[in-house]
Image (tube, grey):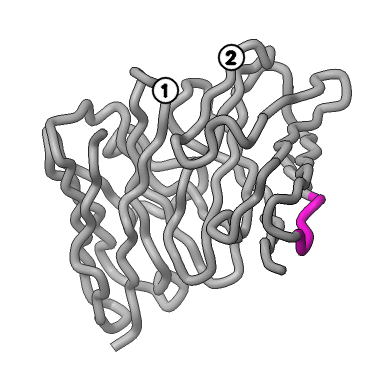
Amino acid sequence: EVQLLQSGGDLVQPGGSLRLSCAASGFSFSSYAMNWVRQAPGKGLEWVSATSSSGSGTYYSDSVKGRFTVSRDNSKNTLYLQMNSLRAEDTAVYYCAKTMGTWYFFDYWGQGTLVTVSS
Amino acid sequence: EIVLTQSPGTLSLSPGERATLSCRASQSVSSSYLAWYQQKPGQAPRLLIYGASSRATGIPDRFSGSGSGTDFTLTISRLEPEDFAVYYCQLYDSSPRAYTFGQGTKLEIK
């Protein structure tokens, strides 16, 4: 059974940093691209970042480019999102999501972790 | 950047009725790159349809997707109580690599 177990969400002050983790099991983690998708309170879904299966390719939305860094440790089956220079508008539930065999869609999602940016 | 516009914003129907949800792209896209997700309160989204018309694993056959070009449709043939949720369409863009979601359609019990 595919499982994505997230951790790391917290309350952080504007300008602060936070690292999210997503521990994967039940599939060959190193074979799949992985993503982060967020959802602000009461709002829709917004793609944040993606990383290739090896981690050599990383991609970001314009809203987080230069502030967030996605990485993965295939030896630990874990995906990370390092978030720096956090802003109030980054407040959201963050989901990690596995891509299908192609890059196109997200077939499994983590349970989500809440990041609140507030003073 | 391609924009996905979903309509209606809210759809009020009764169990047993047929639901038709629309997703319109701001320019023509490949149907291979279009998906639909269901999200219930407090839960992560669930993949329903990919490639515009293929059902994901475990999705009941009352869910179907269709469309091409700029207009795509998710149809739920006969609503069950558990189908009342928010539905999102999603598009993959290869250049640059990015993903876009529609704003969602809330399907509520009438």
Q: Nearer the viewer, residue B61 or B94?
A: B94
Which residue in the protein does label 2 denote?
Answer: A57
What's the residue at 74%, 32% (across, down)?
A: A79
Horizontal placement of B57 versus A12: left or right? left
Query: Is B10 placed above or below A69 here?
Result: below
* A105 is higher (above) or lower (below) than A20: above
State the CA–CA distance, disc 2 to disc 1: 10 Å
Q: Amino acid at mark 2?
A: Gly
Quadrant in the picture for the C terminus of chain A: bottom right
* Residues shaded magenta: A7-12
Q: x, y (%) of residue A56? A: 65, 11
Instruction: State which chain disc 2 sits on.
Output: A
- The residue at the point 87 percent across, 19 percent down is A75
Residue position marked by numbered label 1 in the rendering: B97
Label 1 sits on what residue type?
A: Arg
Task: Tell me the crowding category of disc 2: few under 14, some 14 to 19, or many 20 or more residues within 10 angstroms, Cα based.
Answer: few
**Which chain does tag 1 point to?**
B
**Callouts 2 and 1 close, C-beta under 8 Å:** yes
